[in-house]
Image (tube, helix red, strand yellow):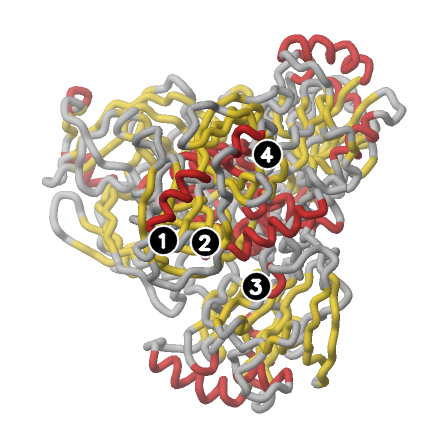
């Protein structure tokens, strides 16, 4: 419990958890991960011991099977529409004819149907809201016939440890509604593997996990107390399943009330516990068991310019902070992150800060930690790229690392892993990688250069993929592409490239020479893409 | 020590056909068994050594009574002994010259008379691909096995403790499993043609250190002052690509592009710069792939031309083209680009340096430390340390300053809250920059009361200890953890 990274999951920092997480076993293996989330990560739960007779009946009315045909982009061939696959998950009806499920169930969906236990018909559905960062999604069905006989489940609270919960869903082993049962084993922060970089409150239950449970409700006494979403594979651990608790679900529901999802916010600092006597004395703090030390502030984050290194945080929104970084909420100790977790973009946070041996009060306005979005696995947006003379340039993303992992050289791996820690985003919001070289007579001397980090093109420093397109338009007879480190430059004659481009595109079945805009919007800052953001 | 460095012994049967027994006389005059006891330092617990193990090989007696073996055979040794082939007569030996890059070592028996009567083996001529040779092994009774071998290739390749490459023979030979085979001689016509340094029993192929390397090593060590193999201190890229040639204004043919030049290296001090096209060295023209034409081997990599052929101190002549203008530059060969670095690569025989202050263990960063993380050290070791080591030249680390880092924390009440920290580079202490363990020690020693504030390159940025507590408590802590000394500077 010594040093904490405030939610931004810095690439390597989450690797420690990665050892235990089945879905993390394949480093950077997001495609695998996606499938594993569907395949392995679903909770099976059952009727609670304290469940009333009515709970099963309620579940039967409101739990739905979600069948999804989805498409997964291939970052190796970013111009391709991707591979199509089908999977099954669960969802449940809540008030207002809304259906809740997991984001990973409907990621990349091209066609969705939902089906109720009591009705053999499959109804087409579409995604209304998706929150990849907390793995929740809302699905809507146009045909009101579908909701006939549903009663809508309501949300409960955080269940007690050791209390019994039931999990409903459609896991492998059959096609009808399944019910399993377990007890609440642990309530703690945990990685949400779908996005690859987020951690939120999660509740561990000891019910078995099986493919197809994802998105199904976990119930106790007629109320939904969570959404089953991930777990360990059997060869890693037994009976360790996780559900998304109701505070996270409620936050999602509140966030989308205005018609769009805005993502989690973050203070974007690092802090250290204040357990050391010499450190306390140095900072002029008494041994009162309170406070944590701010050790790093991420520029462009919520605390940029407001907090300083060496500040001691004593309270957050009036809740005293213990020296281990916990606060009390409703009498329960929780990580101080939880205070921020429940807030939204633009919300203020009030901090009591011990600075230069004086007490100060500061208020900061929360915003999402966009500088870390490189570590977020992307599902919907089409991969961006620029093709030039058979050289394929792509922005560095978690998805790209997923496909380059095996061949990534040290510089590329370090650019990725130190990007957040060293705040490289200030200089280069979106490192551009020469991701592959499509063999052609034009680039016969450039094979084997894939994986290099682009530094400049035609004398222009490259900070985003959009820069690449602009720099390639520079006047001149030759195009000179320089890379980080002691690599030779790649040099082309422009006339030769112009001649070769149609040939290369035809040869490799590429219809567009570049894709730098997504959803009609150019990403000037480029280091992030958030589908729903304005 | 990695197993591939030694000759691997996992023999299959049926390879004895090519093997013939030799007369005892020859072996008695030329080969000697070498037994070494090896005990590497524990980089993660720098105050102790790892468990010892033994190696046994066959050394070549040279005229004059010295014994040639591979350096891997004696790396991190605690003891070296010689044994006569026909008897169990033994004698301790000392290392008189060693070069880990070239993987060669020269031993001398401590009793001057021990090898009396050994005529020794002379150094033979250079071999080339297609030549036949023999790999000699000793039987238990001192008889000799002469295994027919063929030279498959002669070119620049990797050595176990060198990244840049030296001349190496590829050898095909079927070697039966025998004791004393960690090091073996490659012979031809009764003369030494090479030293086997690796062998793979599946492919029945191995590598050998060739004559030019051995000659360079012996000649260098003859005056008692060993200087080692020079290095240019450059990175380069081939210049075949016509577009690239045009860009760097390389007219005609031949030449390589210098993509980085270490200013303190042989090339840098001669005035070569990044972006220059290197056309010739010492009158040897380079082709577009960096090969010169060797009179014996044909096209051979520049590595052999500038590392094996010349000696440290010899003059170096470069013909370059800069911005299309050809010119000659002159310098002298040295090793500064290799030796004068902030973070040394591999180190043998030296204890890792460390300083423990109040439970905080500081070490000097070396390649050897990073290698302790295993084959995937570049993924597993703390990334900041990997970065500083791997990119030290482009990050312009001052070669005069060492990289000091907090390697671990010994938990105690003094270090409460710090105990999980590791792999953090120290930049300063009490406001002063720290470029060596000595500097850190002198700051700590001079501070008898008040705070010791350690400034770190990465999060958490700062650690504080009470100076007097660190002193008194440090001693106790050392005792509690059984650490013999709190510092090794």
Q: Secondary structure at mark 1?
A: strand
User: Which residue is labeled 4 in the image?
Assistant: A140
Q: Are marks 3 and 2 on the same chain?
A: yes
User: Which residue is labeled 1 in the image?
Assistant: A165
Find the distance from the CA under tag 2 to the CA under tag 4.
Answer: 22 Å
Q: Quadrant of residue B281?
A: top right
Expressed as whole percent of the image width and height from the top left, the position of residue A36 reads: 42, 36
Please report, as a chain letter, where disc 1 is located: A
Q: Are marks 3 and 1 in contact (CB under 8 Å)?
A: no
Q: Where is A146 relative to B90, above or below? A: above
- Label 3: how many residues lie within 10 Å, few (<14), some (14-19) or many (20+)? some
Q: Are marks 3 and 2 in contact (CB under 8 Å)?
A: no
Identify the mark nearer the N-term, 3 or 2.
2
Expressed as whole percent of the image width and height from the top left, the position of residue B455 reads: 62, 71
Please report, as a chain letter, where disc 4 is located: A
Find the distance from the CA under tag 3 to the CA under tag 2.
Answer: 18 Å
Work out whether residue A437 or residue A347 is closer to the camera in this orientation and state it. A347
Mark 3 or 1: in front is 1
Identify the mark nearer the N-term, 4 or 3.
4
Identify the mark nearer the N-term, 4 or 1.
4
Q: Secondary structure at mark 4?
A: strand
Q: Are marks 2 and 4 on the same chain?
A: yes
Q: Are marks 2 and 1 in contact (CB under 8 Å)?
A: yes
Mark drawn on residue A225? 2
- Kindly identify the residue that appears in the image at 56 percent across and 74 percent down: B438
Identify the mark nearer the N-term, 2 or 1.
1
Taking the image as shown, residue B319 lies to the left or right of residue A414, namely right
Find the distance from the CA under tag 2 to the CA under tag 1.
Answer: 8 Å
């Amino acid at each position: 419990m010594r040093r904490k990274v405030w939610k931004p999951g810095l690439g390597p920092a989450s690797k420690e958890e990665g050892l235990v997480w089945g879905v993390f076993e394949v480093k950077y293996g997001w495609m695998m991960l996606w499938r594993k989330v569907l395949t392995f990560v679903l909770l099976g739960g059952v009727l609670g011991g304290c469940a009333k007779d009515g709970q099963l009946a309620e579940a039967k009315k409101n739990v739905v099977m979600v069948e999804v045909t989805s498409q997964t982009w291939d970052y190796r061939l970013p111009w391709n529409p991707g591979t199509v696959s089908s999977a099954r998950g669960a969802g449940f009806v809540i008030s207002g004819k809304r259906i809740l499920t997991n984001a990973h169930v409907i990621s990349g969906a091209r066609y969705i149907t939902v089906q109720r236990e009591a009705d053999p018909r499959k109804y087409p559905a579409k995604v209304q809201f998706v929150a990849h960062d907390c793995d929740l999604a809302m699905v809507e069905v146009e045909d009101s016939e579908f909701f006939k006989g549903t009663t809508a489940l309501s949300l409960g609270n955080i269940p007690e440890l050791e209390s019994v919960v039931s999990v409903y869903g459609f896991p492998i082993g059959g096609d009808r509604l399944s019910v399993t049962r377990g007890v609440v084993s642990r309530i703690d922060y945990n990685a949400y593997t779908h996005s690859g970089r987020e951690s939120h409150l999660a509740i561990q239950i000891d019910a078995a996990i099986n493919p197809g449970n994802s998105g199904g409700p976990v119930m106790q006494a007629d109320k939904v107390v969570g959404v089953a979403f991930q777990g360990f594979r059997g060869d890693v651990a037994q009976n360790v399943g996780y559900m998304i608790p109701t505070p996270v679900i409620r936050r999602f529901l509140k966030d989308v009330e205005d018609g769009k999802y805005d993502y989690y916010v973050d203070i974007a600092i690092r802090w250290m516990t204040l357990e050391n006597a010499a450190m306390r004395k140095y900072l002029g703090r008494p041994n009162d068991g309170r406070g944590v030390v701010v050790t790093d502030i991420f520029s462009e984050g919520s605390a940029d310019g407001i907090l300083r290194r060496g500040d001691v945080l004593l309270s957050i929104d009036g809740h005293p902070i213990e020296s281990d970084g916990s606060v009390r909420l409703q009498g329960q100790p929780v990580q101080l992150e939880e205070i921020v977790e429940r807030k939204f973009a633009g919300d203020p946070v009030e901090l009591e800060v011990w600075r230069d041996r004086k007490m100060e009060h500061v208020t900061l306005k929360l915003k999402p930690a966009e500088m870390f979005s490189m570590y977020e696995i992307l599902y919907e947006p089409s991969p961006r790229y620029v093709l030039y003379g058979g050289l394929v340039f792509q922005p560095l993303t978690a998805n790209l690392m997923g496909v380059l992992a095996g061949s990534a050289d040290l510089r590329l791996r370090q650019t990725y892993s130190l990007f957040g820690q060293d705040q490289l985003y200030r200089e280069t919001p979106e490192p551009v990688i020469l991701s592959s070289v499509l063999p052609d007579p034009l680039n016969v001397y450039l094979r084997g250069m894939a994986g290099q980090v682009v530094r400049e093109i035609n004398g222009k420093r490259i900070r985003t993929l959009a820069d690449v397109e602009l720099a390639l338009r520079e006047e001149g007879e030759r195009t000179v592409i320089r890379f980080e480190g002691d690599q030779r430059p790649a040099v082309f004659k422009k006339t030769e490239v112009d001649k070769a481009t149609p040939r290369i595109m035809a040869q490799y079945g590429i219809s567009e020479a570049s894709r730098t805009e997504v959803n009609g919007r150019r990403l000037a800052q480029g280091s992030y893409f958030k589908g729903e953001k304005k | 020590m990695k197993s591939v460095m030694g000759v691997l012994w996992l023999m299959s049967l049926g390879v004895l056909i090519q093997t013939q027994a030799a007369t005892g006389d020859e072996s008695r005059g030329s080969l000697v068994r070498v037994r070494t006891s090896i005990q590497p330092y524990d980089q993660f617990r720098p105050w102790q050594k790892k468990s010892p193990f033994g190696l046994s090989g066959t050394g070549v007696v040279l005229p004059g009574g010295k014994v040639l073996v591979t350096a891997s055979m004696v790396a991190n040794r605690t003891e070296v002994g010689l044994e006569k082939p026909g008897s169990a007569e033994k004698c301790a030996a000392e290392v008189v010259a060693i070069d880990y890059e070239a993987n060669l070592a020269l031993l001398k028996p401590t009793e001057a008379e021990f090898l009396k009567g050994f005529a020794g083996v002379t150094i033979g001529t250079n071999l080339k691909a297609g030549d036949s040779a023999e790999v000699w092994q000793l039987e238990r009774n001192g008889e000799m096995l002469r295994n027919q071998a063929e030279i498959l290739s002669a070119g620049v390749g990797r050595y176990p403790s060198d990244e840049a490459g030296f001349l190496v023979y590829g050898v095909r030979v079927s070697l039966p499993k025998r004791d004393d085979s960690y090091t073996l001689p490659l012979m031809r016509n009764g003369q030494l043609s090479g030293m086997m340094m690796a062998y793979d029993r599946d492919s029945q192929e191995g590598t050998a250190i060739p004559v030019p390397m051995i000659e360079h090593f012996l000649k260098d060590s003859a005056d008692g002052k060993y200087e080692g193999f020079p290095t240019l201190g450059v990175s380069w890229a081939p210049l075949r690509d016509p577009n690239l040639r045009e860009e760097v204004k390389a007219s005609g043919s031949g030449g390589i592009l210098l993509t980085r030049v270490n200013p303190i290296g042989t090339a840098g001090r001669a005035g070569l710069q990044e972006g220059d096209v290197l056309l010739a060295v010492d009158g040897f023209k380079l082709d577009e792939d960096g090969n010169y034409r060797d009179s014996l081997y044909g096209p051979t990599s520049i590595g052999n031309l500038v590392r094996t052929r010349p000696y440290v101190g010899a003059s170096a002549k470069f013909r370059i083209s800069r911005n299309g203008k050809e010119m000659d530059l002159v310098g002298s060969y040295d090793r500064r680009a290799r030796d004068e670095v902030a973070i040394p690569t591999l180190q043998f025989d030296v204890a890792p340096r460390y300083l423990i202050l109040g439970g905080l263990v500081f070490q000097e960063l070396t390649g050897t430390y990073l290698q302790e993380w295993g084959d995937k050290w570049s993924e597993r070791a703390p990334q900041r340390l990997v970065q500083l080591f791997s990119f030290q030249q482009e990050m312009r680390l001052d070669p005069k300053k060492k990289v000091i880092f907090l390697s671990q924390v010994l938990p105690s009440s003094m270090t409460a809250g710090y105990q999980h920290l590791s792999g953090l580079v120290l930049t300063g202490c009490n406001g002063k920059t720290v470029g060596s363990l000595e500097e850190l020690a002198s700051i700590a020693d001079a501070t008898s009361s008040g705070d010791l504030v350690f400034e770190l390159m990465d999060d958490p940025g700062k650690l504080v200890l009470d100076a007097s507590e660190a002193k008194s408590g440090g001693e106790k802590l050392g005792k509690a953890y059984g650490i013999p000394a709190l510092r090794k500077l």
